[in-house]
Amino acid sequence: MNKPTKLLASLLLGLASLAASIFAADGPREVAITANDAMQFSVKEITAAPGETLRVKLTNVGKMPAQAMSHNWVLLKPSTPAEVNAFGMKAQSKAPTYLPDDQSAVIAHTKLLAGGQSDTIEFKVPATPGEYPFLCTFPGHFAIMRGKLVVK
């Protein structure tokens, strides 16, 4: 690595450390996400520092009846697309929460929300950098209502 590259890397590490201490001093960073009747999350990607505390607020802005269009936000450990699909399939049959019995892959999740409802959860971001998928597990939603938490 040449000197300018090393200097830039050191500067970036210092800024990341400063940002982490600022976030810690101000409390958890809030990420507001909406979910709608078109089965879409307003946020598809969240970037966070390892060990950062996040507060995720999910609001279902939809108008359809709860039996037809409820939403949740479920953060999983790193998983392949096939594993996310398998998790979503298992969850579909587990009314009323739509979470499978084995939740060992789950890092955090909101409640299932009808239109107009909100739920806020707080969790510590995993210490290991990587991509952590999130999805809605209401029946039929997991195939398109997805995103990822990028830890770096």
Image: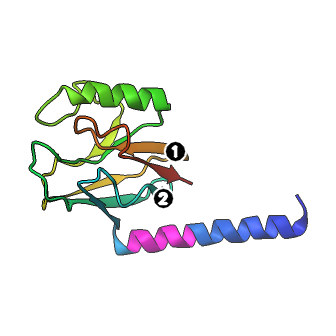
Residue type of the residue flagged with mark 1: Glu
Instruction: Find out whether residue 23 is within the magenta segment.
Output: yes
Q: From the viewer's perspective, tell me whether residue 88 is left or right of residue 131.
A: left
Q: Where is residue 135 in the image (x, y as percent from the top left)?
A: 35, 43
Q: Where is residue 46 in the image (x, y as percent from the top left)?
A: 45, 58
> In the structure shown, which secondary structural element does the residue marked by tag 1 occupy?
strand
Q: Nearer the viewer, residue 2 or 41?
A: 41
> In the structure shown, which secondary structural element does the residue marked by tag 2 occupy?
strand
Q: From the viewer's perspective, tell me whether residue 109 is left or right of residue 134.
A: left
Q: Is the residue marked by circle 1 packed among few (<14), some (14-19), or many (20+) residues within 10 Å?
A: some
Residue type of the residue flagged with mark 2: Ala
Q: Is the residue marked by circle 2 packed among few (<14), some (14-19), or many (20+) residues within 10 Å?
A: some
Q: Which mark is residue 131?
A: 1
Q: Can residue 37 be seen in this view?
A: yes
Give the overall secondary structure of the magenta segment.
helix
Q: Nearer the viewer, residue 130 or 58?
A: 58
Instruction: Find out whether residue 85 is within the magenta segment.
Output: no
The nearer-to-camera label among 1 and 2 is 1
Residue extent of the magenta highlight: 17-25
Give the mark nearer the N terminus: 1 vs 2: 2
The quadrant of the image that shows the C terminus is: bottom right
Q: Which residue is drawn at 36% across and 59% down?
A: 54
Q: From the viewer's perspective, tell me whether residue 11 is left or right of residue 59.
A: right
Q: From the viewer's perspective, tell me whether residue 57 is left or right of residue 21.
A: left
Q: Which of 55 and 143 is in front in this view?
A: 143
Q: Do the residues labelled 1 and 2 touch (CB within 8 Å)?
A: no
Q: Where is residue 130 in the image (x, y as percent from the top left)?
A: 55, 45
Q: Where is residue 122 in the image (x, y as percent from the top left)?
A: 28, 56
Q: Mark 2 points at which residue?
A: 48
Q: Which mark is residue 109?
A: none
Q: Residue at x 25, y 57 (%)?
A: 36
Q: Residue at x 55, y 73 (%)?
A: 18
